[in-house]
Image (cartoon, grey):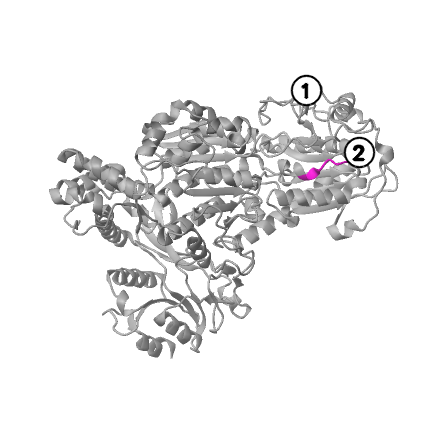
Amino acid sequence: MELKNYQRKVLDNLAKYLTCYGETGSAADAYRAYLADDGLEPGRGGVARYNDTLSGVPSVCVKVPTGGGKTFIAANALGLICDGLADRPADVVVWLVPRKEILTQTLRQLRDPGNPLRMALDRDFAHRVEVLDKEDGLRGRGFSRATVEDQLTLFVLSYDSFKNKDGRRAYAENSQLMPLTDYQRSTGQAVDVSGADSTALISALAGTNPIIVVDESHHAQSELSQEMLRNLNPRFVLELTATPRASSNVISRVTARELKSEQMVKLPVIVYRRHGKREVVQDAVLLQRKLEQIAIATEETGGDYVRPIVLLQAEANTSDEAETYQKLKQKLVDAGIPTEQVAIRTGGVDEIGSTDLMDRRCPIRYIITVEALAEGWDCPFAYILATVANKNSRVSVEQIVGRILRQPYAHRSKAHSLNISYVLTSPGDFNQTIDQVIAGLNGAGFSKRDLRTSDIQAPEPQAQTNPHQGTLDELAHEGTADDTSDDDFTLTFPDDHAHAGDATNETADTQGDSSVDDIIEDAEKTEEDFQNQAEEEAEQASGSGTGLGDGINQFKIREAVAASVEGLQLPQFRAQIEGGLFTDETWVPFEKHMLLANFDLTKCGTAGVTIVSSGMENARQVDVDEDDELRVRQLAQSQQDELRKLFAHYTDKTKRMTVRDGIMSLMTPQFRSTYGDRGLRDFVGRVVKDMTSEQIDSYMDNGSRYSQAVVDEINRQAKGWCRDRFMKQLNDRIVLEPSYKFPSSMIIRNPMTKYGRTLYEAENGKLDGIENDMADALSNSEKVLWWHRIDEHRKDGEFCINGFINHYPDFIAMTTDGAIMAIETKGEHLKNDDSRDKLDLGTRWALMAGHGYRYCMVFAHDAINHENSYTFDEFKKRLLA
């Protein structure tokens, strides 16, 4: 299963926070630096300050609405977190969930080799993954020193695992865990947990200093929950929820429109007013049948199998008059609906059990509930929520409205009516239901914007008029009918509706029911408008970073220059991909990794690797980030001492193997995937073979220097290889074509409005000396129509020259005669080989783009000897005067 764009955004945001944490060593400082990169400041503009509840341990939260795949995000996040912390060879993760249903579901998914969650873990941890439950931990199954040191050990536990009476077992003495806890004490890793035996499960877990994932973290608000987290001695906590706590440190937020544009949810939710309980249930049945007919027709034209399900919300059994689930089921059966199509799912009755509701052989089309369908119950076939609770009932739609939101198969149906959610309610509780639906949407991470209402008014129960759209405010002031006389009703259908839920009944037809036809027509138009709006907003939000600003620091293209970029597409490189036996060759956006296909490290020399072993830097764990920069964190003293003792007793051969494997282990999975384990092992092995004994013995104190030397040399040779192949393939397998469009709006991290002639209402104000001079010069030149400061750190949404390096020029400008200039500025300290590469690539880009394009590299004083290299004064005189 591929990651959706918004899921990639969340993971990118998490990776950026981890980078900030690696650079600052402080959870709060990392939070501040992370938000600053998106133009936000804790404590201002509605952005909360970092809340340090775990004494310096980083604890961050991701806000994802219901249906957004939080668990899939979490599974993909674990590799990032382990790489970002990179302070041990293996990891223990405690994955906490709030309910038994979610516990069972999560365990099943993570243990299934074919499930996308498990596949993500196997990919990131080289199939060295063990998924355990509480009983496994208590019995010591798969939880020992050997397993902890050699693999990812992932415990899936409930919040109550350490809190209730049964949870006390985790605090008791446990002989099965004594070997592990004894080792933790001998190495200084043991942690004293208040009220727990030193050999207890919670003590053993605390000694591993685990990473913690808190699923549906809004349930973990109590002091007991927070105490449990502290007792587990985490080194990183990741919360996932649709509704973050006020104390949560949110680093990324996904919007409902992003989910809609990625086809994950059925939005909008449309609430329809019916005349009374009888009409609510009867129209729900007719609507189900109509939707199923549409689904059958859609499948016959290539669509997926869908069997729409109605959730009928009954009243609690609090009085003889209550429309209880037993009464409601009997009325449906009496009206001719087959018994096997109706199932009850309440707190005390579960007629669904382990039935796969999405199985074609499953007959269920109606599920009667009260409030039992909370988190952990999931069926994308649920389309209609019909509530027959009267206005005095305590039953709340809020608790279950989120159960009808998931889109089947996570992609949009060709039938508009199968892309939205329906709520039917009676007039006595219409406004109350609307309020509850809004509250339910809020609880699922959505908002009032994702709701539509449609009202049907008629003077007599049997007469029906077309529904009309209305705002919530308008409907709130309308009178409501009293439906107390509607408590006892009988369902009746025309003969052709006697088996309205029976997909095999070909005679069933709702064509004659104008009310249901109006609902379908109304819904299809609403969904189409909503979808268009969602796609437009998603496009405008492209590259919007954390999503925390909610419009803060979002600036549009200035109206005065908007026409000049209306149809403008800046040229970028595209590459030819060879076709297969049954496919033609295609052209795709060029990416530099395409040039590494035949780059073979086994044929690369190692003479350029310079190993420096002088000086003591102490042992480090090192991680390589996405820019191939090494991030270093110091090991605990006890870990250093343990490693030195072991290393001192090794033979020379074993030492060299340890050094080779150690250097490779410091490389990220992304780096290793790029160059391949076989080539890396050969290259690093030859480097280590040529090391002196002194260099080998000094490895433990200079690991990051050794790793830096190897990575630098590999990157240097790979860069040269890519440059040569790129130049050879130009105009053959690599071409330049118009492709980049400026977004209609951008999030500007450090907005600056003091300069004129800008493309956007504000531009990035984080400028150094010569960048400030260039912005001033462009703003005051009569030859410049507009200019834009490209923020390389944003990457997404910004223009780059995508060659053998990804070159983000500092400025892009349009002159009054329509010419485009890409401008790179350089201070004197930045005149280096990188400057040569950018200058050559930019020059080639402008030459291939043709008339109307220029590339300029501008130096503060001394320029490189090249036709497109200028000093700042030369640039102003020749191009701006």
Q: Nearer the viewer, mark 2 or mark 1?
A: 2
User: In which quadrant is the C terminus drawn?
Assistant: bottom left
At x 69%, y 29%, the residue is: 369
The image quadrant of residue 324 is: top right
User: Within the image, what quadrant is residue 399 found in?
Assistant: top right
| Residue 451 visible within the image | yes
Residue at the image position 46 percent from the left and 56 percent from the top: 35
Are the residues at dot 2 and dot 1 in contact (C-beta closer than 8 Å)?
no
Q: Which residue occupies 61% across, 38% down? A: 405
Residue pushed farthest top? 339
Mark yes or no: residue 816 visible: no
As drawn, the label of residue 340 is: 1
Residue 747 lies, in percent from the top left, at 49, 59
Label 2, secondary structure: give it.
helix
Measuring from the top left, give residue 837's x and y in whole percent: 27, 60
Taking depth in this image into account, of 406 and 306 the one nearest to the observer is 406
Q: Is residue 693 left or right of residue 292?
A: left
Q: Which residue occupies the foreground of this view, 234 or 457?
A: 234
Q: Is residue 624 left or right of residue 154?
A: left
Which residues, given as a range, are shown in magenta?
Answer: 393-398
x, y percent for residue 824? 34, 66
